[in-house]
Image (cartoon, rainbow, N blue to C red):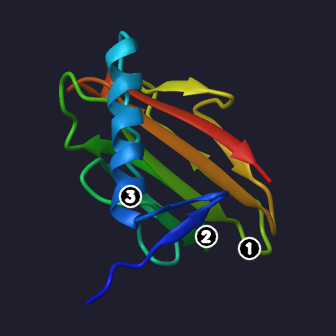
Amino acid sequence: MASRRISLGSKNMRPKSILLGILLALVIAAASSPVLYVKVAIPVTAPSTGGGKLVVDFLNRESQTNLTGDVTFAHATNLVAGVAKFANVYLFAGNTNRLIIFPTNWVLFGCTVTNTALSNQWTALYFKQNGTSQTNVWVKLEVQ
């Protein structure tokens, strides 16, 4: 099978060459940076309709939930020392405002322990873990 070429301006390069160039650029950038963070989209274990207690599982992927009741985050699982992991949760409140409640020992940015997801709007939650205890779970909340 013949190689497929991709035109980049006046040069023709094979897709494999492009990928190797990108990887080389990442390695060079990492070598010159004192800290390298890798962002991985990780979901949260959540009921399909929302409501109840949710657990942030840092081994899963991104999650999207339509809320039919208030939501309380119970805790986070699969926390790892020395590795920064991220999770994203997107909540849609439906026709009614919903409460979003976080554990008091999590580090909160742009929110408080009790928050309101506004009706007919999306609420984005961004989680980060950087240690093995619940005090190493950070969350940032943004509304549509």
Q: Quadrant of the N terminus?
A: bottom left
Image height check: is 51 above or below 55?
below
In this view of the protein, which residue sits in the foreground, 82 or 66? 82
Task: Please name the residue shown 34% across and 43% down the image.
Answer: 23
- Left or right: 66 as drawn, with respect to 35: right
| Residue type, mark 3 in image | Val
Q: Which mark is residue 82?
A: none
In the picture of the structure, the residue carrying the numbered disc 2 is 67
Place of residue 57 in the rendered image (x, y in percent of width and height, measured from the top left): 29, 51
Query: Which of disc 2 and disc 1 is earlier in sequence?
Result: 2
| Residue type, mark 1 in image | Gly
Q: Which mark is residue 44?
A: 3
- Left or right: 38 as drawn, with respect to 125: left
| Residue type, mark 2 in image | Leu
Asked if the residue at tag 3 contacts the one at tag 1, i.e. Cβ–Cβ closer than 8 Å, the answer is no
Asked if the residue at tag 2 contacts the one at tag 1, i.e. Cβ–Cβ closer than 8 Å, the answer is yes
Camera-side mark, 2 or 3: 3
Asked if the residue at tag 3 contacts the one at tag 2, i.e. Cβ–Cβ closer than 8 Å, the answer is no
Q: Secondary structure at mark 3?
A: loop
